[in-house]
Image (cartoon, grey):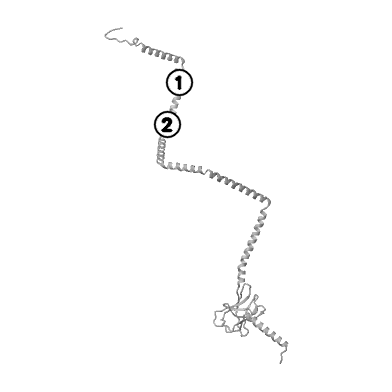
């Protein structure tokens, strides 16, 4: 019996399709030759979960998503084909998660506390777990908000700076910078002058130190002088100044009276000073006395008579 060419082509195409189908599901982790235990869970949003997506427990592939159907008002019912014989404790949670940075969705089973195991066909609790991209997004979102706020603040600041930097303000700032430059130049000149005067300043400091040292050496002498000054001050404090002033006043009054009498030409002293004739007579008498004295010295025998043995001249 001969097989036609068309039949051969059809059989070859069928085998190729079956091989492709088996290989496709094999690469996705599904074993089509073994019957899986089926469970289900309901998600409000499957976020791009695909039929045939991997189901994992502690990173190990234990099944695949068998089917998905929309339940109006509840979400999406997901049928989970899990390897037959795998123990699923009561309270196990099926977490919808991202397996890579591209956001490929997988279902991760978190075993429950029990007690007992779930029977095939039971409903697993559903939950959503943020993947790597979700975590990065959750970390970046606040930073992006802060960056947006910062950029807005910078924009406001730059706007204020642009308004501030008008032509007049630019001129004033330029003048201020010029004044600062002049001040800096003056400070540099002052510094140079101070450097030039360093030797003189050092000499002044040395002299001041020498004076201080001398004062320290003569401290006892200075204390003695201050003690004497203090003693003199105490003596001056004990002097009856008021009595001395009264005596001086009395004396001055008496001198005034004497001067008045002399000027009055009535008393002896006044006549002596103010009477010209009396002055001339006194002067003549003094001259006569002087002549007499000179004559007595020259010829004393005229005025002194000496007798020896009763002899008379």
Residue in view at x 65 percent, y 55 percent: 161
227 horizontally vs 18: left or right: left
Q: Residue at x 64, y 59 (%)?
A: 154
Q: Residues within 10 Å of mark 1 (few under 14, many from 20)?
A: some
- Of pointers 1 and 2, the one earlier in the residue sequence: 2
Quadrant assignment, res 44: bottom right
Position in image of residue 267 (x %, y %): 44, 19
Name above or below for residue 93 compared with residue 289.
Answer: below
Q: Decide which of 207, 95 is in the foreground and name it.
A: 207
Question: Which mark identifies residue 262?
Answer: 1
Q: Determine whether, in the image, residue 184 is placed left or right of residue 310.
A: right
User: Residue 234, percent across and down?
Assistant: 41, 37
As helix, strand or loop, the secondary structure at mark 2 comes to helix
Task: Name above or below for residue 288 compared with residue 37.
Answer: above
Quadrant hosting residue 127: bottom right
Q: Dot 2: within a 10 Å radius of its alpha carbon, few (fewer than 14), some, or many (20 or more) residues? A: few
Q: Which mark is residue 244?
A: 2
Q: Position of residue 143 (x, y in %)?
A: 61, 65
Spatial separation of the CA atoms under disc 1 and disc 2: 27 Å
Name the quarter where the N terminus is drawn.
bottom right
Q: Position of residue 274 (x, y in %)?
A: 46, 18
Of residues 304 and 213, which is closer to you in this image?
A: 213
Q: Nearer the viewer, residue 123 or 138?
A: 138
Instruction: Report the side of 310 relative to 69 (left or right).
Output: left
Q: Residue at x 45, y 42 (%)?
A: 210
């Amino acid at each position: 019996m001969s097989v036609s060419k068309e039949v051969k082509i059809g059989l070859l195409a069928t085998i190729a399709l079956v091989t492709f189908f088996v290989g496709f599901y094999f690469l996705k982790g599904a074993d089509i030759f073994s019957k899986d235990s089926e469970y289900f869970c309901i998600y409000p949003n499957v976020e791009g979960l695909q039929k045939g997506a991997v189901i994992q427990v502690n990173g190990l592939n234990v099944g695949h998503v068998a089917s998905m159907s929309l339940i109006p008002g509840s979400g999406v019912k997901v049928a989970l084909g899990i390897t037959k014989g795998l123990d699923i404790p009561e309270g196990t949670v099926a977490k919808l998660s991202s397996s890579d940075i591209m956001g490929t969705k997988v279902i991760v089973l978190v075993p429950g506390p029990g007690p007992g195991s779930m029977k095939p066909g039971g409903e697993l609790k559903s939950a959503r777990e943020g993947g790597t991209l979700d975590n990065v997004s959750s970390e970046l979102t606040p930073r992006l908000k802060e960056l947006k706020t910062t950029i807005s603040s910078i924009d406001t600041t730059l706007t204020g700076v642009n308004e501030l930097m008008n032509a007049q303000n630019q001129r004033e700032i330029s003048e201020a910078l010029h004044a600062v430059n002049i001040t800096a130049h003056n400070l540099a000149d002052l510094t140079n002058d101070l450097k030039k005067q360093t030797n003189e300043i050092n000499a002044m400091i040395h002299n001041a130190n020498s004076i201080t040292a001398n004062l320290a050496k003569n401290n006892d002498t200075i204390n003695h002088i201050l003690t004497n000054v203090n003693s003199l001050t105490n003596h001056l404090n004990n002097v009856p100044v008021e009595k001395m002033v009264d005596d001086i006043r009395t004396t001055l009054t008496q001198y005034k009276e004497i001067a008045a009498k002399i000027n009055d030409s009535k008393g002896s002293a006044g006549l002596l000073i103010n009477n010209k004739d009396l002055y001339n007579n006194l002067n003549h008498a003094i001259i006569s006395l002087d002549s007499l004295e000179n004559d007595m010295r020259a010829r004393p025998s005229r005025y002194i008579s000496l007798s020896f043995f009763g002899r008379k001249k």
